[in-house]
Amino acid sequence: KRTPELTAVAQEFLRCREVGDAGRKWILEGKGIRLAKFVGIDYSEPLLRCMEMDFDHHYYQCGELMGDESYRREVLALFRRKLPMGRMPSEPEDNLGLGEKYADYSKLGCLVQNLVDYPMCGEDFIVLALQSPVVSNRNAALRALNAWCKEKGCSLDCLSAELAQEVRVLKGRECSESVLNNMVKYGF
């Protein structure tokens, strides 16, 4: 059973110099981010470098950098450079997006999930997710748009005429029951 005393001893141990030194080494490899947060080690710049050097193995950590506006811009720019955005739009499919063929769509979905708390940030990725063959990406884009509308206290049309038009186009072509249900649920 965890007691306040045991928690205090564990925290003291995790904050010792040796653990901090090990944590800094791990961070250079994109590892130990939760430990770094806990002990107060700045991991942002090393993690961004890891994402730049090995995007395929570190893209999923984008959410760790999104809270800081300057790093959010860097993450979005990195995704714009690394994803073949011009080749990704597709007709909607009732598709889970599994397998290597859909790896870029998985990366897109990861990013879009992390845009929920940042209204009107990364709209191009929201549009791309709405044009994705993968159901989860389209649903993630709709969730983000719903959250943005709630945050701004407005309808989708007031939020962005372009985004509202993308949703209307999708609505006419959508083949997934879950996506259509979410459009209704969110009032789109």
Image: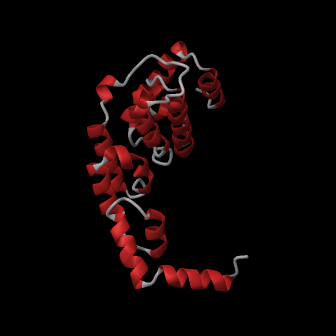
Residue 17: % across, % down: 40, 84
- Residue 132's quadrant in the figure? top left
Camera sees residue 127? no
Vertical arrangement, residue 104 with respect to residue 94, above or below: below
On the rendered image, what quadrant is the N terminus found in? bottom right
Residue 49: % across, % down: 28, 56
Say how the picture is coloured: secondary structure
- Residue 71's quadrant in the figure? bottom left
Vertical arrangement, residue 93 with respect to residue 146, above or below: above
Camera sees residue 170? yes
Residue 102: % across, % down: 43, 29
Residue occupying the point 55% across, 41% down = 147
Residue 187: % across, % down: 62, 28
Q: Residue furthest right?
A: 1
Q: Is 76 on the left-hand or right-hand side of 15?
A: left
Residue occupying the point 36% across, 65% down = 27
In this rendered view, identify the residue nearer to me: 151 or 37: 37
Vertical arrangement, residue 116 with respect to residue 10, above or below: above
In this rendered view, identify the residue nearer to me: 113 or 155: 113
Residue occupying the point 52% across, 31% down = 156
Number of on-image labels: 0
On the rendered image, what quadrant is the C terminus found in? top right
